[in-house]
Image: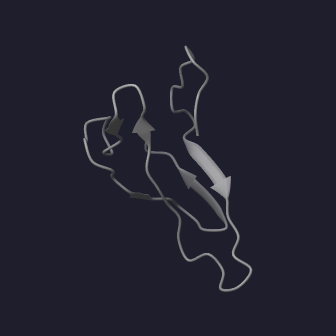
């Protein structure tokens, strides 16, 4: 997900999406969020990590992640 230059995103209502796997189904969805300008990753509380951090979404074929 990217925002246009100069745009801001407040994280509300979080991130949501859908996923499919025709062969075995989707067991879980994980995501990581990076601030491209600062080159830092979301650590669950803010963009404080210099290394990639993965977060477990709620759901699988239809998923959400609200902790942004």
Residue placed farthest to the top in the image?
6
Identified at 70% across, 85% down, the residue is 23
Q: Tell me how the rendering is colored.
A: one colour
Query: In which quadrant will I find the N terminus?
Result: top right
In the picture provided, is 34 more to the left or to the right than 9? Answer: left
In the image, 8 versus 2, the foreground residue is: 2
Q: Quadrant of residue 34?
A: top left
Query: In which quadrant will I find the C terminus?
Result: top left
Identified at 62% across, 49% down, the residue is 16
In the image, 41 versus 46, the foreground residue is: 41
Identified at 74% across, 80% down, the residue is 22
Q: Quadrant of residue 15?
A: top right
Image: 65 above or below 3: below
Relative image position of residue 30 (x, y in whole percent):
48, 61
Relative image position of residue 10 (x, y in whole percent):
51, 26
Q: Quadrant of residue 63?
A: bottom right
In the image, 25 versus 5, the foreground residue is: 5
Residue placed farthest to the bottom in the image?
24
In the picture provided, is 53 more to the left or to the right than 33? Answer: left
Relative image position of residue 19 (x, y in whole percent):
67, 64
In the picture provided, is 67 more to the left or to the right than 8? Answer: left
């Amino acid at each position: 997900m990217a925002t246009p230059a100069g745009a801001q995103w407040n994280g509300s209502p979080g991130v949501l999406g859908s996923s499919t796997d025709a062969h075995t189904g989707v067991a879980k969805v994980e995501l990581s969020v990076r601030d491209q300008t600062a080159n830092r990753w979301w650590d669950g509380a803010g963009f404080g990590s210099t290394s990639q951090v993965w977060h477990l979404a709620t759901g699988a074929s239809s998923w959400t992640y609200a902790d942004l």
